[in-house]
Image (cartoon, rainbow, N blue to C red):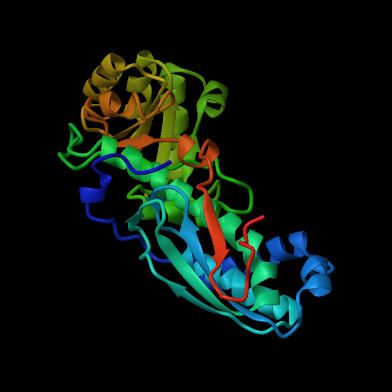
Amino acid sequence: MAPGPAAADRAAPVPAAPVPAAAVRRIAQAALQEDAPRGDVTAATFVPAGMRTRAAVVAREAGVMAGGEVFAAVVREAAAHAGTGECRVQQTVSEAAPFSAGDVLLTVEGPAHTLLLAERTALNLLQRMCAVAALTWQYADAVSGCVSAATGRPVRIADTRKTTPGLRILERYAVRCGGGANHRDGLSDAVMLKDNHVTLLGEGEQLTAALRAGRARLGHTVHVEVEVDRLDQIEAVADAGIDTIMLDNFSPAELVEGIRLVDGRALVEASGGVSLQTVRAIAETGVDVISVGALTHSVRNLDLGLDTVDRDSHAACGA
């Protein structure tokens, strides 16, 4: 999931607000409880209680940094969870910055028991977040220079709700680190009528009337998006005063026609069948947004390792 060949020359995007500390702590506590409900029996048995160590998180492959504070939070929670004493974590690659294989992302120094307890959980989350950021970077890089036909603004790459249960807030942050945009937080945050909703509401004038009635009940404080999968559905939806129309699984030629039919009455989002091989052609049609479920549902975690660098420690961490 490394950035593309040109990525090293591109300025790192600036991520939006960091993940709230309370949310990070909740995730860290739950993950540590899952991994060590009765403590770390290996370290407790074989590693002297007073031993201290130094270690470095080293990239085994290229990626984009996302989640340094999450890693540090897991280490803090591990110390509190086991009462083994706090470690000092220092981040050496900035959030949203690309890195290469062999780069040191963070360093950790402190009680060995704390580090060993935190290691796997902290790496799991960091590997996931860096992978999401790196894949998003590739998609954003692939559509660089493409603009909306209606507004002239850059085409945006957005995530979806196809996230890992319990980790959505971290994955959405990682998307921002990779230069992508976030779609709605969840079902409570915006209206999005997908194919099943539309089928229930009917077609043609019946669909338009149902959408207008719902729009009136909501007012204009809630963003309303409607998915269509045929060109002949567009007029009924656009005529209802909808904010965004999603063209689902349309070919590039159909997207061009769909944009013409919408005629600036709504934002146009493309979704379905999006890959690194197809995203450029989709963006060149002039859509406003391209939503990509693969950013979170198909990403492969990056290979990162936590290696001890203390002279008295002979084995590398990361098992």
Residue plotted at (52% across, 57% down)? 126
The residue furthest left is 152
* Quadrant in which the N terminus is drawn: top left
Task: Identify which residue, 143 or 66, lies in the foreground.
Answer: 66
Q: Residue at x 61, y 61 (%)?
A: 316
Percent position (x, y) of residue 173?
A: 45, 56
Q: Is residue 203 left or right of residue 316?
A: left
Quick check: can you spot residue 219?
Answer: no
What x and y, as percent, mark residue 228?
42, 23
Query: In the image, 296: left or right of 100?
Result: right
Residue closer to the observer: 185 or 302: 302
- Above-or-below relation of 22 to 261: below
Tell me: residue 88, above or below residue 274.
Answer: below
Q: Nearer the viewer, residue 269 or 37?
A: 37
Residue nearest the viewer, comparing 311 with 104:
311
Location of the C terminus by quadrant is: bottom right
The image quadrant that residue 261 belongs to is top left
Marks counted in the figure total 0
Q: Residue at x 37, y 55 (%)?
A: 177
Where is 96 relative to 259, above or below?
below
Task: Name the residue located 22 percent from the left edge and 55 percent from the top edge.
Answer: 11
Residue 215: percent from left, percent from top: 42, 40
Camera sees residue 301 = yes
Q: Position of residue 79 (x, y in %)?
A: 67, 79
